[in-house]
Image (spheres, rainbow, N blue to C red):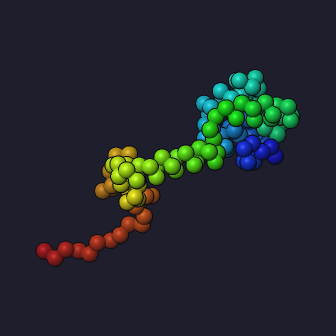
């Protein structure tokens, strides 16, 4: 099992898909990296030799991924919270940040649904 940036790459998947296991690498960036490295997309990750893996690692060094990207994203969120921007206040309250409605379906950020007692008529 190959390791790239501290992440184990699955051997049984195509290298185009296997690279997406690294945080910050999606399908498009994966294709771009493999094009620059001149490696076939359909090749299995387990069948790559060390020279090809080294070329891929060199190409990946050009981008901010894994720990650096996570740190950068969390710092951006903290900055928004400190300056009390709209997005920052939504992050503080644990509510949806990007304009979604909260009356119907925001359970993933708001938590388990709370039942409210019936009102007397």
Q: Position of residue 23 (x, y in %)?
A: 63, 44
Residue 105 x %, y % = 37, 55
Q: Residue at x 37, y 60 (%)?
A: 93
Left or right of 66 on screen, residue 37: right
Residue 62 or 120: which is nearer the viewer?
A: 62
The reply, left or right, for residue 61 in relation to residue 54 is left
Residue at (42%, 66%) from the top-left corner?
112
The residue under the point 35% across, 69% down is: 114
The answer to whether residue 23 of the structure is visible from this angle is no
Rendered image quadrant of residue 63: top right
Out of 120 and 4, give the one closest to the viewer.
4
Relative height, residue 113 to residue 11 (above, below)? below
In which quadrant will I find the C terminus?
bottom left
Q: How many marks?
A: 0
Q: Nearer the viewer, residue 71 or 33?
A: 71
On the image, the x and y values in percent for residue 83 come to 37, 50
Report which quarter residue 22 is drawn in.
top right
Residue 44 image point, x, y percent: 78, 35
Q: Is residue 7 left or right of residue 114?
A: right
Q: Is residue 61 above or below residue 104?
A: above
The residue furthest left is: 121
Residue 62 visible in the picture = yes
User: Residue at 75% across / 32% down in the picture?
Assistant: 58
């Amino acid at each position: 099992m190959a390791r790239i940036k501290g992440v184990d790459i699955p051997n049984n998947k195509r290298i185009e898909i296997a690279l997406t296991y690294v945080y910050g690498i999606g399908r498009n960036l994966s294709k771009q990296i493999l094009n620059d490295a001149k490696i076939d997309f359909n090749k299995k990750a387990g069948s790559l030799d060390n020279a090809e893996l080294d070329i891929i690692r060199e190409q990946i060094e050009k981008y901010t991924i894994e720990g650096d990207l996570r740190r950068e994203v969390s710092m951006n969120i903290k900055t928004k919270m400190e300056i009390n921007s709209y997005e920052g206040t939504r992050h503080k309250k644990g509510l949806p940040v990007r304009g979604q409605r909260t009356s119907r379906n925001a359970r993933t950020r708001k938590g388990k649904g709370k039942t409210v007692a019936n009102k007397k008529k």
